[in-house]
Amino acid sequence: MKFGETFTEYLQGDQERFLDKCSHIEYKQLKKVLKRCRSCRTSQDSGVETSPEEENGGLECQCESCPLCDQKFFSELMKEASDIAGCFRSRVRRLLHLHISTGLQSYMSRALHCFTNDKQTMAQQGRLLIEYAAMNAIAIRKILKKYDKVHSSVNGRNFKTKMRAEHIELLQSPWLIELGAFYLNSNRSNGGESGNFSHPFSCDFDADKPVMTLIIPDSVKLEYNLTCAICLETVFNPYALRCGHLFCKSCACSAASVMMFEGLKTAPPETKCPVCREIGVYANSLHMNELDGLMKKRCKDYWRERMLAERAEMVRQSKEYWDLQTKYVLGI
């Protein structure tokens, strides 16, 4: 079955209500642009003149380059990809907030969402979000591959690089790792509910390099490294910077020259990621609560050892900070 038909069935399937307020790739519309582009090229190669209607529609193409098609195709795809990434972040953030909230905060969150945060419903929401990310990511990959085939170009491949630079590629999002940890935590506690996706996530903390694995349709296997690039240990109390790189909180704070009790968001705007050297990535850092919870369940001794060490370091830094403040006030 062609992917276009599979994607249409997905949009019209059981999750149609879930997708009602979610953006998605207009796969058929983008494919129509490519088909008309190919027919324009065929007519030009055969010496047939392009009609005024086709010219006015922005579909006139040349043999080796297609600037009008590039503008129409990539601008629309970038808008759709940005909307999807924003929608995905928003839905995952809301789901995980419901999952970790406690006390009065939990009651208020449940009231705002009509008390629908029972474990089974939340696990179902997590599965739908995994499907949503996977299907739209595959749609983007397929349409870009089709674009390069039609135009005999590498513009589609270059667009993937641009998506990574703009942090809108779904399968590279730290929110997907956090959703995977939530899925594994929920799957363990609700008797293994997995829906149509049969255990898409797995996590191995005992390997030489701890990884989380995601298997999506088309037998695509993605692995997310859970090693801190600074201490080279399994990330503890993990944070993801805006660029997507994962670090232990203590390591990231040390790299940014801020105290742990101050937090990563107090880092100066010009602070760079220790891996990719991108600036401005600390302000929107993401605390990976679900991943930390998964590690706490599966690596109890390691988690406790790191927790005690981090707590001792935080106490040391706090004491040092307040000693300096006291000396400054007293003029010593």
Image (cartoon, helix red, strand yellow):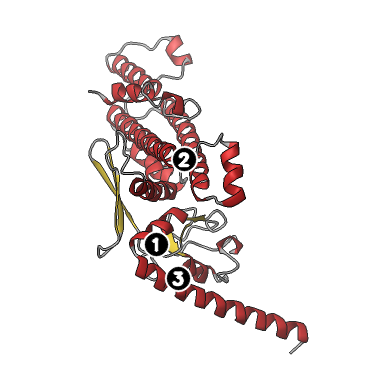
The residue at the far bottom in this view is 332
- Of the 4 image quadrants, the one containing the N terminus is top left
Visible residue check, residue 123:
yes
> What percent of the width, then of the height, locates residue 154?
32, 38
Visible residue check, residue 233:
no
Task: Please tell me whether residue 184 is drawn above or below residue 317 in the rendered image.
Answer: above
- Give the Cα separation between the discs numbered 1 and 2: 22 Å
Give the number of the disc on residue 307: 3
Q: Earlier in the sequence, mark 3 or mark 2?
A: 2
- Give the Cα separation between the discs numbered 1 and 3: 10 Å
Looking at numbered disc 3 in the image, what kind of residue is underneath it? Answer: Met
* Near-viewer residue (127 or 111): 111
Mark 1 in CB contact with mark 2 (< 8 angstroms):
no
Residue sitting at x 45%, y 70% = 307
In the picture provided, is 121 more to the left or to the right than 156?
A: right
Looking at numbered disc 1 in the image, what kind of residue is underneath it? Answer: Lys
